[in-house]
Amino acid sequence: MAEQNTVWALVLAAGEGSRLKSLTTAPSGTAVPKQFCSLFDGPPLLHEALRRAHALTQEARTCAVVAEQHRQWWSHALATLPAENIIVQPRNRGTAIGIVLPLLHILARDPRAHVVLLPSDHLVQQESVLAESLGDALAQLQWRTREALLIGIEPEEADPELGYIVPGEGDGRGAMTVARFVEKPPLAQTRELIRAGALWNAFIVVSSAAALLELFQARIAPIVTAMQTAIAYDLQHPGEGALTALYEELPSVDFSRDIVAGQEDSFRVLAVPKCGWSDLGTPQRVEEALRKGPRPGASSRLRSGVAFLSLAAQHHRLHMLQGAGV
């Protein structure tokens, strides 16, 4: 396994969750990003991601990237993390920029870092299955210095709203090559992909931080350099806001579309058995998760505090309103 003191967990918590807005808009009209909501009652989904992170590494090497406009929610939800481990984006510039910023911060502190990217809005019914695969992935990093590992989950159904990884051949080291990525294919194509062995792309990445940064430099090198310069300047001149000014000029860059696609040779995929995974990305997937009930053993050492919104309560409220014809 990668040396324990080089493993960093990066929780991705800056998203807006716009596809779920009908469920994440409170009766007051305030839209709460889904990572700060709970599925049932209790702590937010973000805490589930933190629990996964803490199973991999120490709190001192657990970081979260968040959005400035969400401060009212994350300032409480991330209160246990060291302040320097909370990386704040001045504004949303796409998923790729949202990874580069914390990645540069981690590399500045630990050039030998190995990172696990963990989205903050996932539900996993069988956490032990995913945990075992993450452990396997970290173990492989001792000989994978240039390849990033993706977690691909065996599909439980044909879902055209998800991304798919089409595996190639086994690489003889416990993973498979990546033949291609397919984002949100039509339903008929989704079924064909699954029959051909395609996996759900869980957007969980395990890699050396340096190798991961190379993927960004191959596509958006000027942006990476500009961000490095702004971060260094702000460290030397606190309060002048070089990074904030840069974010005003940055384009929006999508990780899947603009960075990953076309760099299949730089990735390997680990197949994970069915484990009740969902990104809770649409009202339909939330409804399916609610039908399954609370995850077994959902309590954890992070089970303190209450989410800003319960998706179950919201679903019930909207169902009642629809039934009343409101």
Image (cartoon, rainbow, N blue to C red):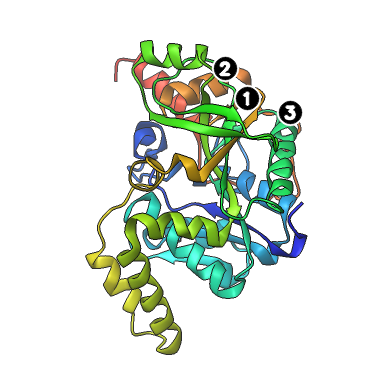
Q: Is residue 118 left or right of residue 261?
A: right
Front residue of 63 and 232: 232
Q: Is mark 2 on a helix, strand or loop?
A: loop
Distance from the alpha carbon under mark 3 to that under mark 1: 11 Å
Q: In this view, does 310 lie to the left or right of 236?
A: right
Q: What element carries label 1?
A: loop
Residue highlighted by disc 2: 156
Between label 2 and label 1, give the one nearer the viewer. Answer: 2
Residue located 72% across and 39% down the image: 131
Distance from the alpha carbon under mark 2 to that under mark 3: 18 Å
Front residue of 311 and 54: 54
Residue highlighted by disc 3: 296
Q: Position of residue 142 (x, y in %)?
A: 72, 54
Q: In this view, does 124 lie above or below 144?
A: above
Return the disc, 2 or 1, that comes first in the chain's sequence. Answer: 2
Q: Which amino acid does label 3 sit on?
A: Pro
Residue located 34% across and 41% down the image: 257
Q: Where is residue 271 in the image (x, y as percent from the top left)?
A: 63, 29
Between label 3 and label 1, give the one nearer the viewer. Answer: 1
Q: Which amino acid does label 1 sit on?
A: Gly
The residue sitting at the bottom extreme is: 237
Distance from the alpha carbon under mark 2 to that under mark 1: 8 Å
Residue highlighted by disc 1: 276
Whether residues under marks 2 and 3 lie with C-beta atoms below 8 angstroms apart, the answer is: no
Whether residues under marks 2 and 1 lie with C-beta atoms below 8 angstroms apart, the answer is: yes
Quick one: label 1, few (<14), some, or many (20+) residues within 10 Å? some
Return the disc, 2 or 3, that comes first in the chain's sequence. Answer: 2
Quick one: label 2, few (<14), some, or many (20+) residues within 10 Å? some
Q: Is residue 288 above or below residue 24?
A: above
Task: Give the number of the disc on residue 184.
Answer: none
